[in-house]
Amino acid sequence: MSEQETRALVLVCRRDFCRILKRVLRSEGFSDFQHGDLSMVCGSALEDRVGGNTEVFVVSTDAEHAERLISLLRACPIRGEKEEVFELYTVGNA
């Protein structure tokens, strides 16, 4: 995989969505991803905005797999009082 094709997906989600997200990542063959609290990527600025009940996943993959994962996550049936279950950021070369 060339560097130009690499995408880093940063997924910020509520803790109650983490198990679902881990299951989706593993079922799609992503086993080498980073997972932790928000300080892993940005310190306390984002954590103050979204609250302490939030975690982050960082996944590195090629553009095709990144698009598939984004599509799957957007299609997840999510129930609950809050609609904002996760935020997704793509970092990489276009």
Image: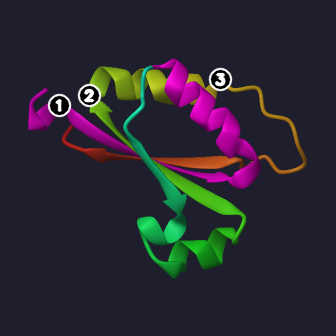
Three-letter amino acid code at the position of disc 3: Ala
Give the mark nearer the N terminus: 1 vs 2.
Answer: 1
The residue labelled by disc 1 is 5
What is the crowding at mark 2: few (fewer than 14 residues within 10 Å), some, or many (at least 20)? some
Furthest-right residue in view?
A: 81
Tell me the CA gap for discs 2 and 3: 20 Å
Left or right position of 65 against 13: left
Is residue 18 inside the magenta stretch? Answer: yes
Three-letter amino acid code at the position of disc 1: Glu
Is residue 15 inside the magenta stretch? Answer: yes
Asked if residue 55 is positioned above or below residue 20 in the image, the reply reads: below
- SS of the residue at dot 1? helix
Q: Residue at x 51, y 29 (%)?
A: 25
Tell me the CA gap for discs 3 and 1: 24 Å
Q: Considering the image in quadrants, where does the N terminus appear?
A: top left
State the mark number for residue 88.
none
Q: Give, as a single range, the part of the protein colored magenta.
A: 1-28
Asked if residue 40 is positioned above or below residue 86 in the image, the reply reads: below
What is the crowding at mark 3: few (fewer than 14 residues within 10 Å), some, or many (at least 20)? few
Tell me if label 3 and label 1 are in contact, CB under 8 Å.
no
Q: Residue at x 57, y 50 (%)?
A: 87
| Disc number lying in front (2 or 3) | 2
Q: Residue at x 46, y 77 (%)?
A: 43
Tell me if label 2 and label 3 are in contact, CB under 8 Å.
no
Left or right position of 10 against 14: left
- In the depicted view, which residue is nearer to us: 59 or 89? 59
Q: Measured from the top left, where is residue 6 in percent x and y?
A: 21, 36
The residue labelled by disc 2 is 62
State the mark number for residue 75.
3
Left or right position of 64 against 11: left
Q: Measured from the top left, where is residue 68 in percent x and y?
A: 44, 20
Q: Residue at x 66, y 44 (%)?
A: 18
